Image (spheres, helix red, strand yellow):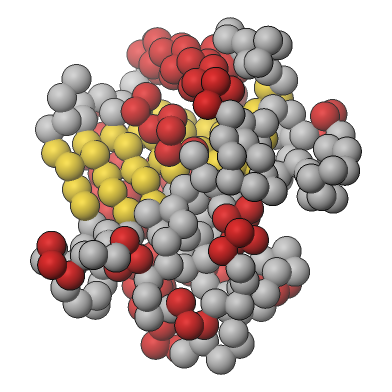
Amino acid sequence: MQPILSKTASPVDERGVGNPASQASLADGPPWDMVIQNGPVMVTAIHAGHTIRRSLQPWLTISEQERLREEDPLTDFFLPAGDTIVRANRSRFEFDLNRPPEKAVTVDPQDTWGLKIWDPDLPEQEIERSLALHAQFYRLIAERVEAMIAEHGRILVLDLHSYNHRRDGPEASPALQSENPDIDLGATTLNKDVYGNLLEGFKAGLQSRQVRGRTPDVQVNVRWEDGGNFPEWLHATYGDAACVLTLEFKKIFMDEWGCGADILALQELRDGFLAAVREGRESLARVAPA
């Protein structure tokens, strides 16, 4: 399938975007990319980015390695399974697309698991600049989701994340498997009367491929009470016209304390994800129009 449109967002109030000579640094490149193809499946990786725009960097108080641990590196590896695909290029700490505006940029460590991300004197104009990007992103998604629903009636949105399970240190025992499945499917907004079969088929697809010699442990709604602002907003705005699943991949595909990735594990997880998306497409096609 060939893409019919590729959108690279222009940052709000950021001088020089669109001029190749001004983009030597990725830090001031596009805050996200969207590729649009025909079809009812959207896949997003809204925490995959790592860059921070240059005007913000003097105010960072966290090391790059610490910041990387709390981002979702490599979740964009799974994006090609979608029709419309969305990747955030900027760090979640520049503006968190899975939080409401009032929490999307915060200097309070209580909002960031005790980590001090920003100097408390972060200028208000920098915060407003980040919040303008947050608002722009939600407008862009609304435009695309509405177009997809108008064309297909019902759509499937898959929001990809990852999580740490060795918070006590690289040499300590990992967190309990019973509370930390290999993949946690967030389906808190999913109407099982409409999409129950899709959920079961999707879970089976994820488990249909072995990862490093074993069947991955896939559970539903184990770790979080909701999937965050992004799926909650989609459900509140579009109801059952949008079936939204949040996938939380435990970092069994990488060293969460370092920078190394297990490429074979990534490929095997992607094979399972591709199988799950095929199941999801087939189930979606069998659901009566909204």
90 and 84: which one is in front? Answer: 90
Q: Residue at x 54, y 12 (%)?
A: 205
Q: Position of residue 197 (x, y in %)?
A: 55, 13
Quarter occupied by the C terminus: top left
Q: How many marks?
A: 0
Quarter occupied by the N terminus: top left
Above/below status of 19 relative to 160: below
| The quadrant where residue 277 appears | top left
Q: Residue at x 68, y 22 (%)?
A: 218
Q: Position of residue 254 (x, y in %)?
A: 62, 36
Question: Left or right: 85 with respect to 271?
Answer: left
Observer able to see residue 8 = yes
Q: Residue at x 52, y 55 (%)?
A: 98
Q: Position of residue 234 (x, y in %)?
A: 44, 46
Question: Left or right: 94 with respect to 135?
Answer: right
Q: Position of residue 251 (x, y in %)?
A: 65, 36
Question: Left or right: 151 with respect to 249?
Answer: left
Observer able to see residue 236 = no
| The quadrant where residue 202 appears | top right
Q: Residue at x 44, y 17 (%)?
A: 274
Above/below status of 9 relative to 249: below
| The quadrant where residue 176 appears | top right
106 and 99: which one is in front? Answer: 106
Above/below status of 234 relative to 204: below
